Image: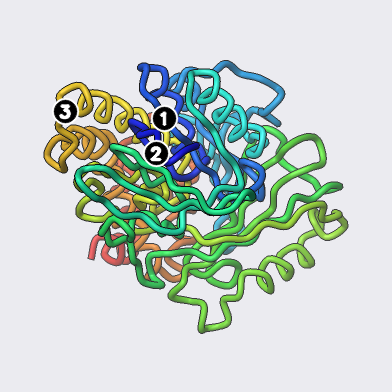
Amino acid sequence: MSGDNVYDCLVVGGGPAGSTTAWKLAGKGRDVLLLEKRQEIGVPVRCGEGISKQLLDLVGLERDPAWISSEMDGAIIHSPGGTSLALGPEIAGPEVGFVIRREAFDQLLARKAARAGAEVRVKSEVISLKRKDGIWEAVVRTVEGEKRVRSRIVVAADGFESGISRMAGIDTRIGPRDMDSCIQYEMVGVETEERFTEFFLGREKAPGGYIWCFPKGKDIANVGIGVNGSFMRDGGEPLRLLDRFISENDRFRNGTITEINAGGVSVSLPPDRTVADSFLAVGDAARMVDPLTGGGVYNGCFAAIQAADAIHDALERRDTSERGLETYERGWRAGLESEMVRNYLAKEKLLEMSDEILDKVIEAISGYDLSEISTEELLKAVGARYPEVLTDIIG
């Protein structure tokens, strides 16, 4: 890492989106520098650790017990009143497939990047970024002091806080309604549905969000909570609510907490633009998290692959302008944006829905095979049983 060298691409952030971008781009023969501000990639874990099986095919990974804790058959949704709804993996969302050891998964992707030829540096934090004569210059704080790095293109993959996007002029600010505050315990000695992830809904439990239980073995699980920011002033403190849920539940109250993690998650629409001249943002840094579930690993890796292709092509054409990187903007939006918009609208509706209405919705559809029924048929089923609920749902 030297100011004399001009890299093809500087990737800031060693999470799944950043490492996948570096891996795929270095595999195309590009000179890539991947920087991670923490001393260990993947630590601390800020994730429920559920991923879809489709992710492995997307990025090209084999199943490996070194980073897979358990395989899931589906999900169980628990309504506020206690009705349980089982979902198959094909419709259960991006958190169903595998429960992983996220630190091991992130480190695997970083090693893939290194083996493809990327230069990977930890304990390296970008503290300033400016562009001069078509080249980005970053000042990086390292254990050896400040260093200067020059690069033709910069990729912001620095997660939820994403200072890099703001340095490049991309506005990623969001309001309280578009973020969840989360805390998670890894617990041993708990009772789980070993092959199912579980989600517990209700304003009394987790206002604007949900409580989850992701099994990692016979008696070990991640038990966590996400609370929407719009409820934080109304007694919606995640730690208090999670502790109360555990203390009131026979399955969890005798468990032992072996790890605690906390952080923020965006549940917003993505910004209007994720590219600028010689710059693009991927993953959480570009608000690509699913607004309904809070899952972001698949979306981040999908965008990373689009980013690597677009950057390589732009360098080949010697046009790294915003227009030259437009294929990235079009590519990730074509693959992700429509579902994100749909799930954002669903999240907005759920924020307004009372526990009574939510109970009735889940009760009305609990007897159906959800893998074979359309959304239109589900709405008809709800309307036939509770016509007043259908009015509330569709407005």
The percent position of residue 23, horizontal first and vertical second, equals 45, 25
Whether residue 63 is situated above or below residue 318 in the rendered picture: above
Q: Residue at x 28, y 49 (%)?
A: 342
Q: Which mark is residue 10?
A: 2
The residue labelled by disc 3 is: 318
Relative depth, front residue between 314 and 162:
314
Report the amino acid beneath label 3. Answer: Arg
Mark 3 or 2 closer to N-term? 2
Between residues 120 and 1, which one lies in front from this camera angle? 1
| Residue 307 versus residue 223 in the image, above or below | above
What is the CA distance from the residue labelled 1 to the residue labelled 3?
17 Å
Taking the image as shown, residue 261 lies to the left or right of residue 344, namely right
- The residue carrying pointer 1 sits among few (fewer than 14), some (14 to 19) or many (20 or more) residues within 10 Å by Cα, namely many
User: Decide: marks 2, 1 in contact (CB < 8 A)?
Assistant: yes
Q: Is residue 360 visible?
A: yes
Q: For the residues marked 2 and 1, what is the alpha-carbon distance in whole angstroms?
A: 6 Å
Say which quadrant the C terminus sits in.
bottom left
Q: Which residue shows up at 49% across the image and 51% down it?
A: 140
